[in-house]
Image (cartoon, rainbow, N blue to C red):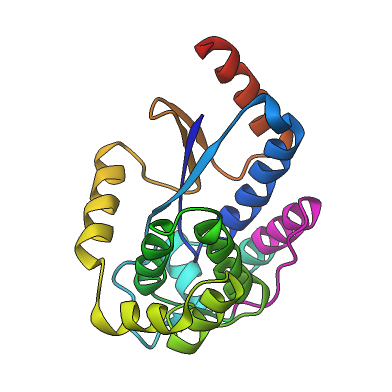
Amino acid sequence: MKIDFVSDIACPWCAVGLNALEIALERVGSEIIVELHFQPFELNPTMDAAGADAAEYLQAKYGMSDAQLAQNRRVITERGAAVGFTFGDRLRVWNTFDAHRLLHWAGLHGGTHQRQLKHALLQAYHGDGRNPAARDVLLDAAATAGLDVAAAGEVLASGAFTDEVRATEKHWQQAGIQSVPAVVINDRHLISGGQPPEVFEQALRQIAAEEN
C-alpha cells in the first residue's frame, strides 16, 4: 500500500495526523505492507525570511478572535497529547520551502530517513519553537535523522530540488488538495485532516480488503 502524506511543517494538525497514522500502522502491523512518502504543501508560501508573529498572522488569516485562537490551541494540544506529541510555544510562523527541499532530498535516500527528518522538523517547530527555515535548525534535523550533514548543507546552499518541489506542490494542488494533512492511499483514496488513529486504522483495513 502506497501512502502519500501531503503536509507542511507549519501545520500543527500534520504533527497530530502523522503520529495518529503511525499508531494505526503499528496496529495493522504486517497485515498491510506500507510505503510512506512525504509530499510538500505550503500553508504560507509567500512568507518572507523574517516570519511573522504567530497569533497576529493566524488571527488575520483565519479571522479568529483571541478566544477562538486560544481554544484552537487547547484542542490541538490535547489531540497531540493523545497521540504522543507534545506541543510547545510557537511564537512565530515561518517559511518552510527549504524544509521541503531537504525532505525531498532525504526521500531519495530510501529507508526511513525522510520519515525521521519529518519528525525532527515537526519537533523542532511545534515542540521546541525553533525556526524551520533556519540553516542550523535544518542541519540539526538532518543530523537527528541520520543524514549526511555536510551533504544536507550543500543542498540548502545550492538551491537544489527547487524545481522538483515546486512541481510536486503543483501536482497535489491540481489533484484537489487544498488543506493538510491529506493522506492519499494508492493514488485513489483520500483521508483529510488530523484524524484519530481509529479512523486511519479502519480506513487502511477497509481499503486493503477492497483492493485485495
Horizontally, residue 205 falls left or right of residue 207, namely right
Looking at the image, which residue is at 66% across and 79% down? 128
Circle count: 0
Horizontally, residue 146 falls left or right of residue 96, namely right
Is 80 included in the stretch rendered in magenta?
yes
Q: Quadrant of the C terminus?
A: top right
* Residue closer to the observer: 144 or 60: 144
Looking at the image, which residue is at 73% across and 39% down? 26
Compared to residue 209, the image places residue 192 above or below, namely: below
Q: Which residues are magenta?
A: 71-90
Is 154 included in the stretch rendered in magenta?
no
Across and down, in percent, residue 11 comes to 52, 60
Across and down, in percent, residue 183 comes to 50, 39
Horizontally, residue 147 falls left or right of residue 105, namely right
Across and down, in percent, residue 203 comes to 61, 25
Compared to residue 39, the image places residue 152 above or below, namely: below
* Residue closer to the observer: 146 or 169: 146
* Residue closer to the observer: 103 or 67: 103
Across and down, in percent, residue 130 comes to 57, 82
Regarding residue 126, the answer to whether it shows in the image is: yes
Regarding residue 131, the answer to whether it shows in the image is: no
* Residue closer to the observer: 106 or 190: 106
Looking at the image, which residue is at 55% across and 42% down? 193
Q: Main secondary structure of the magenta part?
A: helix
Looking at the image, which residue is at 70% across and 74% down? 88
